[in-house]
Amino acid sequence: YNKSLQSITLPNTVEYIGRYAFFGCENLSKITIPTCTEYIGRYAFNNTNDLTVYFNASILPLNLQENWDYGIKAYYVGFKNVYTDGDFELALLSNNCVAITKYNGTQTSIDLNDLSVGTIVQIGGSAFKDSSVESIILPNTIKNIEKEAFANTNIKSIVIPSSLEQVGDYAFYSSAIESIEFEDNSSLVKIGSYAFANTKLLNSIVLPKTLSYLGVGAFLDSSISSVTFVDGINLNTIN
């Protein structure tokens, strides 16, 4: 319950983070996890309000307990450093990959292919939340759209590149989205909980056959009346 802790970089000796380790650290906004960390317990970061977790390792720890990430805003793997480029805040990851962590501009139309910042693989948690963006073009390198990335925006339509693997919890929550198109040969595996909840203009969606996980309340309180599952869909979990 250390409410004064705001940022922490763990030493390169920490292999184990127990359950509830940072529970209730309300003002903790950044934690950096060393490459040697192998275990993170359940609810390790629960009741942190706006936490971003940076992993130095190029892969997640092998022993992650259920709900280890409960309560965090975003996490980044292969983290090197953070920097800004114009209106964008970014995280440099391994192999010259980049995550967009925050957009601070006022443009209504954005083409992320216009950015010369490396290979964009991730839209971070809350990156465009509450922004003025109404139209966005994603690069065909994107793999993850994280929690609340486009929540409360006026984006009306979006084309999801075939490279995308995951749509995070609340990703388009309470947005103005009307149309979602998944490109052919989609790699999408997961749609998180409440990803499209409270979207009052989205009437239909066609889910790609690679999808295997549909989270809790994915379309809760939306206007959706038609969900189409492509023949041969790999869906095995609907929460």
Image: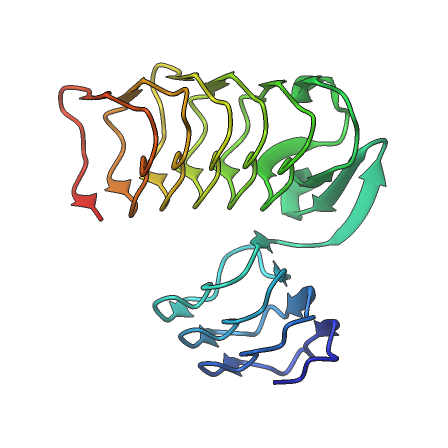
Q: Give the image location of residue 27, x and y in percent.
A: 69, 70
Of residue 224 and residue 120, the one placed in the foreground of this image is 224
Q: Give the image location of residue 20, x and y in percent.
A: 48, 81
Task: Look at the image and name its color scheme.
Answer: rainbow
Q: Is residue 61 left or right of residue 8?
A: left
Residue 192 picture quarter: top left
Residue visible at 62% across and 77% down?
25
Q: Is residue 60 above or below residue 193?
A: below
Residue visible at 43% across and 46% down?
169
Quadrant location, the N terminus: bottom right
Q: Give the image location of residue 113, x and y in percent.
A: 67, 18
Residue 213 picture quarter: top left
Q: Is residue 45 above or below residue 172?
A: below
Residue visible at 48% across and 74% down?
38
Residue visible at 16% across and 42% down?
236
Q: Is residue 237 left or right of residue 119?
A: left
Of residue 174 and residue 150, the one placed in the foreground of this image is 174
Q: Is residue 130 left or right of residue 161?
A: right
Q: Is residue 49 above or below residue 200?
A: below
Count the numbered circles shown.
0
Q: Is residue 45 above or below residue 130?
A: below
Q: Give the image location of residue 23, x and y in percent.
A: 53, 79
Q: Is residue 89 left or right of residue 54?
A: right
